[in-house]
Image: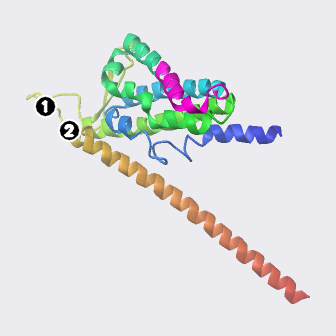
Amino acid sequence: MNSIKRGQHKASFLNGILRENPLLVQVLGLCPALAVTKSLETAFGMGLLFTFVLVSSNVIVSLLRKLIPEEIRTPSYIVVIATFVTIVKMFAEAFLPELYSSLGVFLSLLVVNCIVLGRSEAFAGQNGVLDSFLDGLGNGIGYTWAISLMGLIREILGLGTLTLGKVFSFFGDPLKLPILKSTTLDALGNPTYDYSISIFQNPAGAFIVLGLMLAIMAAISNHKKAVEKAKEKALKLEMAAKAALEGGAK
């Protein structure tokens, strides 16, 4: 029984990270993914706040699931989520003003985010506190790494540089790393080299990057399915050959 429970806890946590990734597999939460991924730090900051809201609302919904009448279930979930969104907004405005300014209205829209509300409805409202906590944490981590990767790609390709410490400024002065664009200027005041592609800082670039990431995930999934089918076919042939040999021996 304990091994079954451990397996359930493990599945609750791991599924959302890769196998059922909210963005790259279920294709949910597209609005913030497309809008706030111009830079790595902004995307990562959004992921952290999103994870806090998701985990906290999952836990509270799971605790109250037997007390909330079915008729007011969804409005009650929205009130719980809105409470934690208000908390993260106040925190970000007070301690991370650059992040708060970058996220804009998309931070408030977490109240009706399909992932947060969906996990409350489909999982936390039906399962215990520990599994709901792990489910929220796993999905939060999965969404965070996905949008952070988008932000990293878009920032490097679109700006040619990678800036660290601009959003999380309490770590010290920002550090700008030249990757595709030089941070040194020539006599005319232009970068000595610039291979950046500005379209990746535009909405079109977000769609391009997301499309490529979805295509890669689909290719990996299809490859795994093909390998599993090939193994099953080989096993069936092996069993059939073994049965034929046993029949011939008799």
Q: Amino acid at mark 2?
A: Asp
Q: Which residue is mark 2?
A: 194
Mark 1 and 2 residues: CB-CB less than 8 Å, in contact? yes
> For mark 1, does the 10 Å Cα neighbourhood hold few (<14), some (14 to 19), or many (20 or more) residues?
few
| Left or right for 131, reference 119 | right
- Whether residue 54 is situated above or below residue 228 in the rendered picture: above
Q: Which residue is mark 1?
A: 190
Q: Marks 1 and 2, how far apart in space?
A: 9 Å
> For mark 2, does the 10 Å Cα neighbourhood hold few (<14), some (14 to 19), or many (20 or more) residues?
some
For the C terminus, which image quadrant?
Answer: bottom right
- Whether residue 46 is situated above or below residue 22 in the rendered picture: above
Residue 133 place in picture, x, y as percent: 62, 29
Q: Which residues are magenta?
A: 65-84
> Is residue 169 visible to us here?
yes
Residue 44 place in picture, x, y as percent: 42, 29
For the residue pair 163 and 250, the one nearer the viewer reads as: 250
Q: Specify the quadrant of the image occupied by residue 113.
A: top left
Q: Amino acid at mark 1?
A: Asn
- Return the residue found at the far front: 71
- Return the residue found at the far left: 188
User: Mark 2: which secondary structure?
Assistant: loop
Q: Specify the quadrant of the image occupied by residue 99.
A: top left
Q: Residue at x 82, y 80 (%)?
A: 243
Q: Which mark is residue 218?
A: none
